[in-house]
Amino acid sequence: MEREFQADFLINKSNKIMVSKENECQIEENYLVDRIVLAEDDTKENAVTSVAVSPKGTFIAFSVSSLSIIIWDFCERNIFHSFDKAHSRNINSIVITSDSEIIVSGSADKSLAIWSLNDRKLVYRFEDAHEGEIEVLASSRGSKYIVSRSRDASVCVWDVQELNMICRIEKIHNESISSLVFAPDGKHIVSGSADRCITICSLEEKKILFSFEGAHRDFIRAVAITSDSQYIVSGAYDGEIAIWSLPRRTLVFRLDEIEKIVIEAITLTGNDKYIIIGYSDTTIAFWGIQEKKLISKFVKAHKQKVTSLTVTADNKYLVSGSDDQTVAIHTLGNKIY
């Protein structure tokens, strides 16, 4: 049974928090918790390519363009380990397993690497996991499966405990896949593509179930799915945002007041009340699903484009990565949850 969206009124803004009061926003107080600065030059050698937070909330993992995977301790507020030269080419995506013990990384070198946090070493590397470079990874909640997608337009599901590939689904889109998520129910894989379609694959049946053809006017940059696996959120290159019902296989609505800025990343607050979007203009925006409008935004959340967003499992913090070689940690405030 599908639930109805509900919403509060509070969302934070960059270093400040903003409250939506009719059509106005009121600045209240500073909610930036920490900023991890990897470098202060303009070389982008440590540009952040992907960010993940452990389900237990004890650490943040992020990959950088210098080919390292860095682990940040939430409690001690410092780097406690780094997997240096983790790949031979750019690390495009990382995920953390549900037990917070394994990090999986996907790279332009076509390999998929599995890293043990307990032993602090490489467990296994799937060489040539895809024919093309691996661009996106997604993890399943409460299970041992990881899904990867490549420029070769294939999607693979991996068992990171048994160290084998479960299945490969070929050519799920006509053009490159820009975003990929594993539904929390562990049954579906949702992908968005430059072909402007959203495709839903069944893990059990190992095939495409259906697609939202022509989901957007422009190519799709990012997709996300609600915690109950009922709704898909998609964002396009032109800034358009849409909500789709997975069980009904229909469009629910499109947000009217779009920011005509390139969308780089999408995530949701843990209560599914707000869509959080990272833009190419350094902004992070918060959209209320119930209100169907922009609630607030971080103006200059970073100095360069936002590349990655994630929310901690307790729904208290938003973590963002950027080309500016920093990772920012923001508290979401009491009213968010």
Image: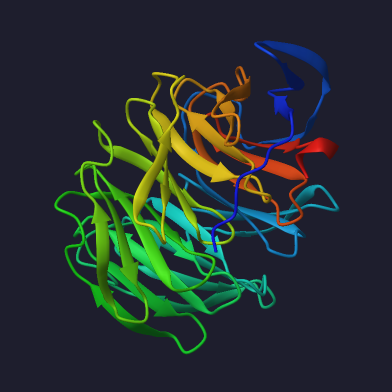
Relative placement, left or right, of 113 versus 102 is left
Would you place residue 68 above or below residue 129 in this image?
Answer: above
Relative placement, left or right, of 165 versus 78 is left
Which residue of the protein is positioned furthest toward the left in this rendering? 174
Would you place residue 162 above or below residue 330 in this image?
Answer: below
Relative placement, left or right, of 55 versus 268 is right
Would you place residue 68 above or below residue 290 in this image?
Answer: below
Q: Residue at x 30, y 81 (%)?
A: 205
Q: Is residue 264 visible?
A: yes
Q: Residue at x 76, y 39 (%)?
A: 336
Of the 4 image quadrants, the one containing the N terminus is bottom right
Residue 94 vs residue 90, the one in the foreground: 94
Which residue of the protein is positioned furthest toward the top in this rendering? 24
Residue 2 vs residue 112, the one in the foreground: 2
Residue 327 vs residue 331, the one in the foreground: 331
Q: Is residue 46 visible?
A: no
Q: Residue at x 82, y 22 (%)?
A: 30
Residue 196 position within the rendered picture, expressed as x and y whole percent measured from the top left: 23, 41
Residue 113 vs residue 172, the one in the foreground: 172
How was the colour assigned to the protein in this rendering?
Answer: rainbow
Q: Residue at x 80, y 28 (%)?
A: 31
Residue 307 position within the rendered picture, expressed as x and y whole percent measured from the top left: 48, 37
Which residue of the protein is positioned furthest toward the bottom in this rendering? 162
Of the 4 image quadrants, the one containing the C terminus is top right
Quarter of the image for residue 142 reads bottom right
Q: How many numbered marks does the figure carry?
A: 0
Residue 75 position within the rendered picture, expressed as x and y whole percent measured from the top left: 85, 53
Residue 189 position within the rendered picture, expressed as x and y whole percent measured from the top left: 38, 65
